[in-house]
Image (spheres, rainbow, N blue to C red):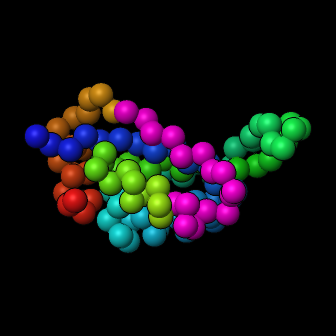
């Protein structure tokens, strides 16, 4: 049975931070692709008050078996005390994308 594909939704302090984390994940073959949305406006509760800031969003395309390693690497490199790392289950994808992603990520 083939490994399942998952996407991880990650917020970062800046495009530069997202690129740094994304490059590290790619170099270690922990993901096959990273999409970066460079500047979004975020509003959120933090330490009892509503905050507003500019952030970047990173979508990490990987496989289920690598999630723990991906999360460890993100936490190691991330500037936030409590970054958002949320798994998005992929129910279906085309066969060539699935095969490409599995080929480009390290076996576990």
Going 80% across and 47% down the picture, which residue do you hit? 53
Which of the 4 quarters of the picture holds residue 4? top left
At which x and y percent is residue 23?
A: 46, 68
Going 35% across and 57% down the picture, which residue do you hit? 31
Outermost residue toward the right?
A: 49
At which x and y percent is residue 45?
A: 80, 37
83 drawn magenta = yes
Q: Is residue 49 left or right of residue 46?
A: right
Outermost residue toward the left?
A: 1
**In front of the other: 65 or 55:** 65
Q: Is residue 56 above or below residue 87?
A: below
Q: Is residue 49 left or right of residue 25?
A: right
| The residue stretch that appears in magenta | 74-89
Position of the C terminus by quadrant: bottom left
Position of the N terminus by quadrant: top left
Going 55% across and 60% down the picture, which residue do you hit? 75
- The answer to whether any part of residue 54 appears in the image is yes
Outermost residue toward the top?
A: 91
- The answer to whether any part of residue 34 appears in the image is no
Q: How many marks?
A: 0
**In front of the other: 29 or 67:** 67
Q: Is residue 81 left or right of residue 4?
A: right
Q: Is residue 65 left or right of residue 16?
A: left
Q: Is residue 43 above or below residue 74?
A: above
Q: Is residue 73 above or below residue 43?
A: below
Going 38% across and 51% down the picture, which residue do you hit? 67
**In front of the other: 1 or 39:** 1
At which x and y percent is residue 52?
A: 83, 42
């Amino acid at each position: 049975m083939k490994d399942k594909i998952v996407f991880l939704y990650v917020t970062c302090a800046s495009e530069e931070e997202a690129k740094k984390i994304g490059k590290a994940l790619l170099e270690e073959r922990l993901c096959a692709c990273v999409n970066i949305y460079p500047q979004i406006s975020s509003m959120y509760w933090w330490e009892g008050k509503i905050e507003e800031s500019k952030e970047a969003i990173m979508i990490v395309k990987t496989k289920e078996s690598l999630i723990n390693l991906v999360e460890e690497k993100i936490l190691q490199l991330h500037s936030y005390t409590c970054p958002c790392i949320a798994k998005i289950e992929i129910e279906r994808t085309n066969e060539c994308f699935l095969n490409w992603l599995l080929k480009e990520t390290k076996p576990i």
